[in-house]
Amino acid sequence: MTWNVRRRGFAAVVGTLIAAAVVAAAMASHAGASRQAGGKLTILMPAGDPDHLDPALWYTLVSWNIGFTICDTLVTYPDSAGEAGKAIVPGLAALPAVSADGKTYTFTLRKGIAFSNGKPITPADIKWTFIRMLTPSMASSGAGFFGDIVGAGALIAGKSKTLPGIVTKGNTVAFHLVKPSGSFLKRITMRFTCPVPNGTPAKAIEDGSLPASGAYMIKSFTPSRELVLVRNPHWASASLGKRGKVDEIDIPIGVNPQQAALKVRSGSADLWLDKLPPADATAALRDPTLKGRVFANPYAAVEYFWMNNDVPPFNNVDVRKAVNYAVDRSQMLRVWGGPSQGETTDQILPPTMPAWRDYKAYPNTPDLAKAKALMKASGVKTPVSAVVRVRNDAPGFVELAQVLQQNLKAIGINLVIKSAADAVNNGIIDNRKNHIASGINEWSQDYPDPEDFIDVLLDPRRPDFPQGRAHFAAKAMIPDYNRVDALTGHARDVAFQALDEKVMRNYAPWAPLINPIEVDLLSSRVTGFVYQPVYGPDLAMLALK
Amino acid sequence: MMSFAFRRLGAGFVQLLAITFLAWALFYLVADVTGANPAQRVAGKAASKAEIRRVAHELGTDRPLWQQYGRFVWKLAHGDFGYSYQQRRPVAEIIYPAAKTTASLVIGAAFVWLVLATIVGVAGGLRPRSVLDRGLMVLVLLGLSTPVFWVAPMLSYFLGYQPTQGQVFSIPLPHPMTLFPIDGYVNLVDDPVGWAYHLALPWLAFALGFAAVYARMIRALVIEQLGEDYVRTARAKGATMRRVIARHVGPNVAPMVATMIGLDVGVALGGAFFVETVFGLPGLGYVGLSSIQNLDYPLTVGTITLAAIAAVAANTAADLAHGALDPRIREKGGG
């Protein structure tokens, strides 16, 4: 045994020397290595993304950003920032012809469009893409957005295998809806509709092997490790505009946000594909050496305190209005990370929505006199307790709840903070038997249309919809909702703003708090940053200096 | 020895069964009680109740719990960890690569902490209460009280990022250089040099805390052994201190260190998460956490089962090593 131990000691010494030599050699070789040259970018991706690579399944901001880079939809959004970036433009097809009754949209596919494997994209591919997405075995989150296509309901329910609402003829695809919709054109831009070849199996294909239809295609994918995109040689750039500035985009996956900021600053990466953490964002915005490389852009989302309109004390409209007067939104913003991370709001719709206007219903700092008067008028006996549920697996939400707890104590409402991971929290809230009184949540858009906020979260026509946590059920408002939904174009956008104001002033089902801002940092060697207002940093427009 | 080994392996198998059942029960039953709903997570935020029910049927989460457990055990018995709700691919495809990464981190770090602890512990034990010993114990205390979630980003910042800006620990360098990568991972088989290079800082970050614990333990054991009669006898017979340490003290200290290593590798598998997060290592810690956040129970239970297998294997190996190094253990065990 002693001999063995001596041999082990010797082996350990030799092992140490070998390991030291290996590490030293590695340091030498890597320290001397030059940066990647040529048209190659390194874009860092957070852990958990992409959630999927199958277009029927992906459903995060980051995944859709990749989707915007590797796929084109029938109609899409341009490579532009600001308002211009929200205008729907031709994609695989020209803008559609809409029937007089507003129920049929006919798209004519462009000539020369092809998948990255060289095969032409046909109307049959488009139809199959929708059938596949709506097939129950796919369990696609996209199914919920296209239930108004004729026959979609039966397909989603598994009672049919066809979709009569999509008709192909020659080079055209016609979508027949059960009723006119002011949002269909926007919904059809969602990345769920990225085309897949006709006959692609209705099961998840997550290895990146599905052919692309955009400026880039997937070259390789190692789950949780790396995604590599290269230019799509079959992309019809001549007809669709100039995208795809670099030859290759390497995307390491699972990067820690703080490390990502360091890597971009050091030049070993070019962009972090998510918003910078608050401290890094503030530091970057203040650093004069980073001038021209830091970009702050609001994104279409709202952080809000929802009050269950069915559960005391928030089943009383005066209490809900009192809450809106008592909350200190300025303090909320400070704990959220300061002005680099958002702007205060008292409205349902974010400023990124079309025709948005600031109607100023409630103050940024507490108006306690008014809040207390409303509490008195409500007839609710104080002090009164209520539960507020928040997620604790993302920064800021518990802190917002703590500020809220202090604010509402001043008007006699004792908030009891309960927190859990988002998925668990959602399950508890959505179980109506739990009678959860309130919570703090973030909602970000699926497509740039007000209905994606108001009709999903606060629709009195379906107060039991899972995401409508306030269970807003004011029957008097139903005619207003019906009227707005029947409109189209600018009139619809303006009407939604008026609806927002009416709901907040008269019913205050929420206390909206913050519209978040995304801060992005670019490496010094890259140019062409465009913050596409729907999809975020436009990777296809980035170029090397 | 064979009988001892068989009994120890049998005990390990029973432990595994118990852990697997508890992991399943914990996640499926607790989720059932709290109302956490994987189908809702998969169906998406805009899904209606009918759509959520449809997805639940596709996932099989609408079946009775006993049926779900039966399927789970049946599959596990066939080496099938199940199918990830969220990632829509076999759990084995996800956890095996992650396990390799975590193993690279933990085994490499264990090597580093043993080397550091042995140097510090033996040096301190040979001259207890000397200036050197006291100085080393201050370092050990520092190592004990510094959490890994602070050490890891600091190492990454000072040795990864600062050199690229022409500094190291804020001391100017002649020119900017890359000393260590800020984060990242490469496969051992693809690039062994790059593998070691990318893991150098994670190993150090992970090893420091454990090295401090082991240094204290080795120091105490060395002091204790040096006071034993057999050491005095060996020295009286003219043996050098180096020989005494190598041939007498070392073999008596090694079994205890081996046992500790076995236990700590299990603990380290759990603690690896912080280091994996900071350095972007796609290991079991990261996979396990994201699976819990996504209510991806098959992946959660698969991760726990695999980690449990590793921990039980490490403990069993440590016990067997202890038995090999110390005959009294074998005899007590009836081997």
Image (cartoon, coloured by chain):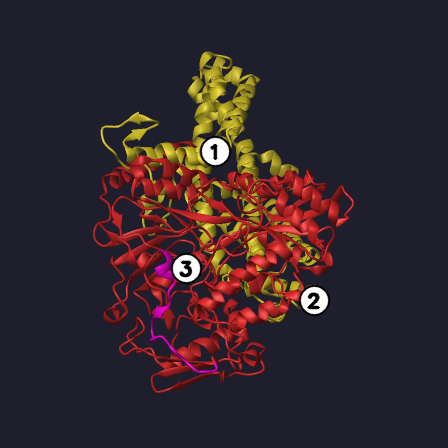
Chain colours: A red, B yellow
Q: Residues within 10 Å of mark 3 (few under 14, many from 20)?
A: many
The amino acid beneath tag 1 is Trp
Q: Nearer the viewer, residue B311 or B46?
A: B46
On screen, residue A73 above or below A425: below
Q: Which residues are magenta?
A: A82-101
Residue B64's tag is: 2
Residue A534's tag is: 3
Q: Residue at x 40, y 33 (%)?
A: B155
The amino acid beneath tag 2 is Pro
The amino acid beneath tag 3 is Val
Residue A402's spot in the image, x, y percent?
A: 62, 40
Give the residue pinned by disc 1.
B150
Q: Quadrant of residue B230?
A: top right
Q: Residue at x 53, y 82 (%)?
A: A151
Q: CA distance from mark 2 to mark 3?
A: 42 Å
Residue B177's spot in the image, x, y percent?
A: 26, 35
Q: Secondary structure at mark 3?
A: loop
Q: CA distance from mark 3 to mark 1?
A: 37 Å
Q: Secondary structure at mark 2?
A: loop
Sequence-first tag of 2 and 1: 2
In the image, residue A469 lies in the stretch drawn in magenta: no
Say which of marks 2 and 3 sits in front. Answer: 3
Check chain identity for marks 3 and 1: say if they share one.
no
Q: CA distance from mark 2 to mark 1?
A: 45 Å
The subunit carrying tag 1 is: B
Q: Quadrant of residue A327?
A: top right
Classify residue A105 as left or right of residue B224: left
